[in-house]
């Protein structure tokens, strides 16, 4: 989401979690927190026993089996969440579990003290940055800092009997996008015009997300893979009791050049409908790349949309450009000027249009290629062409039927 505007412009909101196995010294921990920070809200959280490992996995972003060492270490009974205000935040580099990071030193040192008091390990959790606070609060309570603290506290220690948000599926796509906004870096790559009211655009049967981390995306959305293949990223998410399908493309998967992937996330824009999309130029060229490189034939709706988008960006592209080869030249010029290459996707189900790639190479675009059986690619081309023309025939038949009924 855009920079959060709140009443803490000169201070920061963070949280501590005192897991069950640290509560033997909770009075000492709470006293220390009160001494160094302003306590804004305290919750006692109760997760259901059968979902504790799943909740823990989704909260920490690591897939943990039932009765894992982590689960046994922290305990599975109720735990405290203490939301605090640090009025004088100081940032320094500390060695964290994810390496040397620039973090809120006040929180980091307090958390370290509390862990020492509880025998070492990670029986006390504390946020290192405000971004992490939003991540944790959103997963725990379904609301970010601003929205949660707008609500008045009901009592000194509020009881919370809910699992991590989305544990039993999502009430709406709007709810899921709100959680993604506060937890991961992502963009909806394309066909996002109907969102969030409708799940899919016409003739496009999934939601394409580009994400920083595939694992985080699967855990936070609480998705299930549709295929067993380790290279497939097609996942099913339950929304309003319906199965909704997502493709989670991620950094380093060669769906696009890594340098371009990083730029897409860095340049993303927050749509007026409250989700992230690529910046206009990245949207146009990534869709053009998808149409030319990931497809054996270009759907008519893509041609129409790309021509319209090109006009808005003052890029010369006509419907005839896709037959003349000019569209490949437009794409190639963009790739070369930015130092991007053609990349063969790690997901072997993605078609790779060698004809257009060779045309681009002749213009100077580099190719990062993985081994692929030519026969497999040939078979996929025929299958994709069959699906393309079948869908086209069905659309034509529906149109004829509509005209017949009208007459």
Image (cartoon, grey):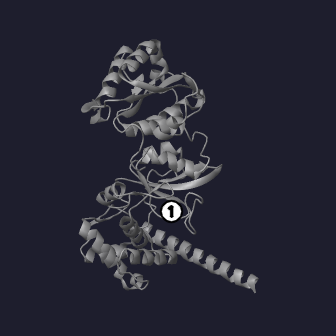
In front of the other: 251 or 149: 149
Q: Is residue 184 left or right of residue 101?
A: right
- Give the image quarter of residue 293: bottom left
Q: Is residue 61 among the parts visible in the rendering?
A: no
Residue for point 47% across, 40% down = 146
Q: Where is residue 263 drawn, in percent x and y?
A: 32, 58
Q: Secondary structure at mark 1?
A: loop
In the rendered image, the vertical position of residue 162 relative to residue 207, given as above or below: above
Task: Report if residue 25 is visible in the image.
Answer: yes
- Place of residue 398 in the rendered image (x, y in percent of width and height, measured from the top left): 67, 78
Which residue is located at x 59 percent, y 46 percent? 170
Q: Is residue 198 left or right of residue 187?
A: right
Graded by Cα atoms within 10 Å as few (under 14), some (14 to 19) or many (20 or more), the crowding at tag 1 reads: many
Q: Is residue 95 above or below residue 330?
A: above
The residue tagged 1 is: 192
Residue 31: percent from the left, percent from the top? 41, 15
Apparent side of residue 166 relative to residue 90 in the rendered image (left or right): right
Q: Residue at x 35, y 61 (%)?
A: 256
Question: Foreground: 295 or 338?
Answer: 338
Number of numbered discs on residues? 1
Q: Quadrant of the C terminus?
A: bottom right
Residue 269's x, y, as percent? 40, 58
Query: Who is closer to the viewer here, 124 or 41?
Result: 41
Question: Where 393 falls versus 35 (above or below)?
Answer: below
């Amino acid at each position: 989401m855009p920079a959060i505007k709140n009443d803490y412009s000169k201070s920061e909101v963070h949280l501590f979690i005192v897991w069950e196995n640290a509560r033997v010294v909770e009075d000492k921990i709470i006293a220390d927190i009160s001494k160094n920070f302003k306590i804004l809200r305290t919750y006692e959280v109760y997760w259901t026993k059968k979902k504790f490992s799943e909740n823990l996995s989704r909260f920490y972003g690591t897939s943990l089996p039932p009765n894992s060492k982590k689960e046994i270490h922290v305990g599975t009974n109720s735990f405290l969440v203490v939301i605090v205000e640090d009025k004088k935040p100081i940032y320094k580099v500390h060695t964290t579990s994810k390496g040397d990071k620039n973090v809120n030193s006040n929180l980091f040192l307090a958390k370290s003290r509390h862990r020492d008091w509880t025998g070492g390990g990670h029986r006390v959790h504390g946020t290192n940055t405000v971004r992490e606070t939003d991540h944790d609060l959103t997963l725990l309570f379904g609301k970010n800092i601003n929205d949660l603290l707008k609500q008045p506290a009901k009592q000194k220690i509020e009881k919370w009997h809910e699992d991590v948000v989305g544990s039993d599926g999502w009430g709406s796509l709007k709810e899921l996008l709100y959680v993604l906004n506060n937890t991961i870096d992502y963009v909806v790559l394309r066909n996002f015009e109907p969102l969030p009211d409708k799940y899919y655009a016409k003739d496009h049967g999934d939601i394409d997300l580009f994400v920083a981390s595939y694992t985080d995306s699967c855990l936070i959305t609480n998705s299930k893979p549709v295929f067993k293949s380790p290279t497939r990223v097609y996942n099913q998410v339950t929304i309003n009791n319906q199965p909704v399908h997502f493709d989670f493309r991620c950094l380093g998967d060669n769906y696009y050049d890594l340098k371009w992937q990083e730029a897409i996330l860095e340049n993303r824009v927050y749509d007026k409908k409250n989700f992230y999309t690529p910046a206009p130029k990245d949207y146009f060229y990534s869709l053009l790349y998808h149409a030319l490189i990931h497809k054996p034939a270009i759907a008519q709706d893509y041609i129409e949309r790309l021509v319209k988008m090109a006009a808005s960006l003052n890029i010369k592209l006509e419907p005839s450009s896709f037959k003349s080869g000019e569209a490949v030249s437009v794409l190639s010029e963009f790739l070369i000027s930015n130092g991007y290459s053609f990349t063969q996707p790690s997901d072997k189900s993605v078609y790779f249009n060698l004809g257009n790639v060779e045309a681009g190479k002749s213009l100077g675009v580099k190719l990062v290629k993985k081994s692929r059986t030519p026969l497999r690619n040939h078979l996929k081309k025929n299958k994709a062409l069959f699906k393309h023309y079948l869908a086209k025939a069905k659309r034509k038949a529906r149109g004829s039927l509509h005209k017949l009924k009208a007459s």
